[in-house]
Amino acid sequence: MLGAVLAHIERHLDRWDQGTFWSTGDGGSVHCLAGWTLVLSGKDLGRILSSPGGYGKALRIAQSVLGLSDAQARLLFRSGSYADFAEFAATVRRVTGLEFAGMAARY
């Protein structure tokens, strides 16, 4: 699932912001890695976020969907810590060992 989420983000970089869990506007929804994970896995992000402890619950669900350890989730879900997608992709590679065609070809 992580590869699919990252491929989606890479195809829609204008709709990825690691500092924004969920935002909607004229250009569509903008999400971070955890937010896109929930959306693309069919979870009701609005319902999860509006429940008690919603933000933490959303992060735990995204971590579980992606099969990340606590340490991996802490590194990959960091808010606003990446200068650009290339830096984020390099961190994903370092933390998970994941390579996929789009990232490997350009970063």
Image (cartoon, rainbow, N blue to C red):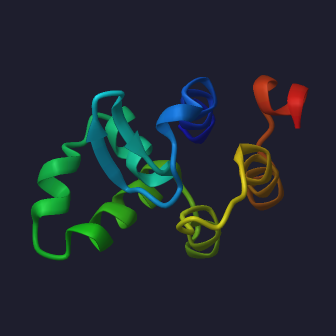
Depth check: 42 or 11 in front?
11
Position above or below: 40 against 75 = above
Q: Residue at 16% across / 49% down in the picture?
A: 46
Q: Residue at 60% across / 23% down in the picture?
A: 11
- In the image, taking residue 5 as reference, residue 93 lies left or right, namely right
Q: Residue at 54% across / 27% down in the picture?
A: 12
Depth check: 20 or 50 in front?
20
Q: Please identify the quarter of the rendering in which residue 58 is found.
A: bottom left
Extreme-front residue of the structure: 26
Depth check: 95 or 80 in front?
80
Q: Residue at 44% across / 53% down in the picture?
A: 34
User: Residue 35 at x, y = what percent?
Assistant: 39, 49
Depth check: 84 or 91 in front?
84
Q: Please identify the quarter of the rendering in which residue 95 is found.
A: bottom right
Quarter of the picture holding the C terminus: top right
Q: How many marks?
A: 0
User: Residue 24 at x, y = what percent?
Assistant: 27, 40
- In the image, taking residue 34 as reference, residue 26 lies left or right, namely left
- In the image, taking residue 32 as reference, residue 98 lies left or right, namely right
User: Residue 42 at x, y = what percent?
Assistant: 28, 34
